[in-house]
Image (cartoon, rainbow, N blue to C red):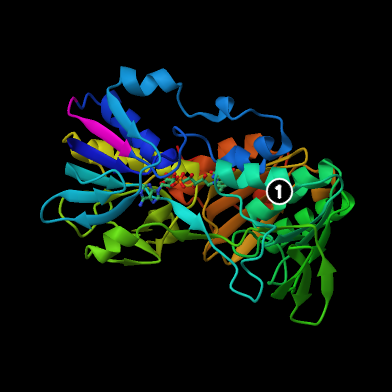
Amino acid sequence: MQFDVVIVGGGHGGAAQAAQLRQRGFAGSIAIITAEPELPYERPPLSKEYLAGEKSFERMLLRPPAFWAERNVEVMTGTRVTAVDPAAHRLETSAGPIAYGTLVWAGGGDARKLTCPGHDLPGIHAIRTRADVDALKADLGEASRVLIVGGGYVGLESAAVLAKLGHSVTVIEAMDRVLARVAGMQLSAFYEAEHAAHGVTIATNALLTALAPAGGIAKHATLADGRHLIADVVIVGIGIVPSMQPLLEAGATGGNGVWVDDHCRTTLPDVFAIGDCALHANPFADGAEIRLESVQNAADMAATVARAITGDPAPYKAVPWFWSNQYDLRLQTMGLSIGHDQTVLRGDPATRSFSLIYLKHGRVIALDCVNAARDYVQGKALVEQGVVVPLAALSDTETPLKTWHPA
Ligand SMILES: Cc1cc2nc3c(=O)[nH]c(=O)nc-3n(C[C@H](O)[C@H](O)[C@H](O)COP(=O)(O)OP(=O)(O)OC[C@H]3O[C@@H](n4cnc5c(N)ncnc54)[C@H](O)[C@@H]3O)c2cc1C
């Protein structure tokens, strides 16, 4: 088998890649090879509406099944790529060898696993794939005691859903606050209080050191400070490990992700990488090399690669954005707060509608907007242009942020 473009991974990046290529008039053959058994689907609902039972899997499909045949895109589900031969432009896969003209690696990541004693006991779940969530749901009894390891977005979103469903939920976070890696202190404090108000126990500075079984499942959790917790179900939300091993084994430069240039080219000939696994110098992080785990990044990198393949290259410089839904709170993030040296609170968290604005050397670099869609929309131009706004004006909710848009 051979295709002009082979896309590895049928997640947000892979699906967008095929669609973007066709949208730009690419007429060559395209295949998506993806390890999961499903056609490309949305991942964000896994810790939100799908876990809550409010959205069916069919409604999570990124495109109707007929879309792929109509666009002449071969989707090989349940197929894993095990090796890349860059000189021969050939892949080894669980379905046999496949030759490519251009390869786009959109492998995303695998849920990071615990390493403490008891890490592999039954009853321990991740939330990365549909299969993960189906297995989790099957293990949830009525009013289960759920222990969530990790106070990041996936852990907190699942906590919100499961608390609403009547489970007794405890979140343990090794750092001194939830969302420590991605948000400012005021936002962490706000979400900790919201979860407490909904009956979720949040334990910070809580490092899990061991899980022990009872009745054949992980039941007893021990923390570094000697505390003990009992759980019927354990959910681990401690990030991902980028999935790109075959590329690195083939000689691609990388480490915590596969390195790409500003057109998403790897160091291997005719091989691009996009999405969660792509380690890139981001202009909104002062050029620091990072991976971004967001639907926006996967889709915009796919657009960058489609331009490069169709002979109309333009470097990747999309403003990062992200969202998270917990209870009736819609958080929308614009920009990256990495390296901020000041924050300004706009609005009162007690009203459950406010924004936290991040500055670096006086310039607006990011906004976290909670039930504040107008700030989110109007903040984009401030982040894009790194606008300097008087602090008093930023905190004044009577003055719309668009007042400070560059002419
Ligand atoms: C529970 C959850 C909630 C989220 N919520 C949000 C949100 O609210 N907002 C937001 O912006 N982002 C959210 N994200 C992140 C977002 O889903 C990811 O950033 C996005 O899916 C990345 O797309 P991707 O194509 O890089 O990788 P993925 O969507 O992970 O797709 C990668 C695919 O590649 C396959 N694959 C990997 N290796 C191989 C191989 N060797 N051979 C074949 N196939 C392979 C995988 O099986 C997978 O199907 C969430 C993620 C999760 C898990």
Is 204 above or below relative to 186?
below
Hey, what amino acid is under mark 1? Ser
| Badge 1 residue CB within 8 Å of ligand 1 | yes
Residue 265 is inside the magenta segment: no
The span picked out in magenta is 27-32
Is any part of residue 331 visible from this angle? no
| Label 1: element kind | helix
Q: Label 1 belongs to which residue?
A: 158
User: Dot 1, crowdedness within 10 Å: few (<14), some or many (≥20)?
Assistant: many
Is 45 above or below relative to 58?
below
Q: Quadrant of residue 353?
A: top right
Return the residue nearer the eye: 299 or 355.
Answer: 299
Where is residue 362 shown, x and y percent of the image? 54, 60
Residue 29 is inside the magenta segment: yes
Is any part of residue 280 visible from this angle? yes
Where is residue 286 shown, x and y percent of the image? 41, 61
